[in-house]
Image: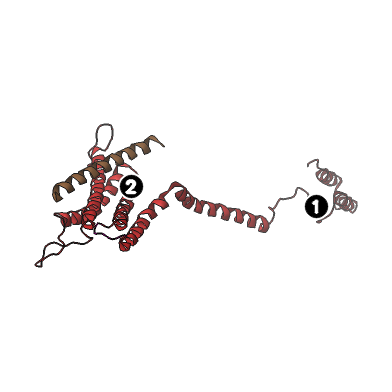
Amino acid sequence: VERHQRRSDGVDVGGHLLLFASTAGLAGAITTIFLSARSVMEIGGSCASGGPYVIANPCPRGVPWLLMGSIMGGLVLALVMSVAATRVGAPGLAWLAWPGLFLSLGWNFWEFGLDPPFGGSVEWGWIMCGALFVAMGAGPVLLALPGVAQTTSDRPTRITARAASVGARVRATTTPPPFRPSADPIPSTPGAGLVDELERLDALHRSGGLTDEEHAAAKRVLLGGGR
Amino acid sequence: MTRRTLWWSAFHLAAAVTGIVAAHALFTAVTG
């Protein structure tokens, strides 16, 4: 049963709306994580909220809920985006959330690590985190570059072509020549020339093994005149 | 670049920009 909302020209409007909304939601979730991380790093990199104790470094208002909600919501939205893309035949781009998340958070680590908001010259802990996050985020992007993807996808083809070439050479050296039934009624000795064949044919004729007609016919065959 | 690639690039770009702008507005509204 076709339950997708479709216009008369066959465009899946519902699927496109779902893809647009989930893509926007996923981008929004990553943006929220990015902004939440910045707001926490501005106050030193850690905070707490709730609980019975006096909190030395309270979190910015609403940030814990925004952060949790955007992480959980982002995971769900990435799944919805993939499903919606498949439904409308769009390219699958939900994987871009991974480099989007790690590169943006890596940016935060580098920015605040090089110029810590609480003083000091360089915060090496954040720089290390930044290096790790950038490596994690950039890896999939580098793998997805057209040149790299083409090289990877060509590899099986090249291997198959090479295997076929080797196989053809092996067959060429091991396969016996095809059997060709000879039109010659007299078996020929390997290496015997036409003269030898004719002499043997004459000898057979003289000994009475062949009639005149048979001898003439065999001679025509040997000389290439056909039967 | 085919028309299909252009279409889906513009589609996803528009969606992403919408989401980013909305998230900025939401974050500012919540955190003040």
**A86 in magenta:** no
Q: Position of residue A66 (x, y in %)?
A: 18, 53
The type of colouring in the image is by chain
**A118 in magenta:** yes
Q: Disc 2 vs disc 1: Cβ atoms closer than 8 Å?
A: no
Instruction: Please tell me how crowded label 2 is: few (under 14), some (14-19), or many (20+) other residues with Cα within 10 Å.
Output: some
Q: Is residue B11 left or right of residue A156?
A: left
Q: Secondary structure at mark 2?
A: loop
Q: Which residues are magenta?
A: A117-121
Q: Is residue A15 left or right of residue A154?
A: left
Chain hosting mark 2: A
Chain hosting mark 1: A
Q: Which residue is mark 2?
A: A93
Residue visible at 46% across and 50% down?
A148
Label the brown chain with its letter: B
Q: Which residue is mark 1?
A: A186
Magenta: predominant secondary structure element?
A: loop
For residue A200, the mark is none
Label the red chain with its letter: A
Q: Position of residue B19 (x, y in %)?
A: 23, 44
Q: Is residue B22 left or right of residue A170?
A: left
Decide: is A80 above or below A135: above
Residue visible at 31% across and 53% down?
A107
Q: Quadrant of the C terminus of chain A?
A: top right
Q: Quadrant of the N terminus of chain A?
A: top left
Could you tell me if residue A20 is visible in this image? yes
| Amino acid type, label 2 | Leu
Q: Position of residue A124 (x, y in %)?
A: 33, 62
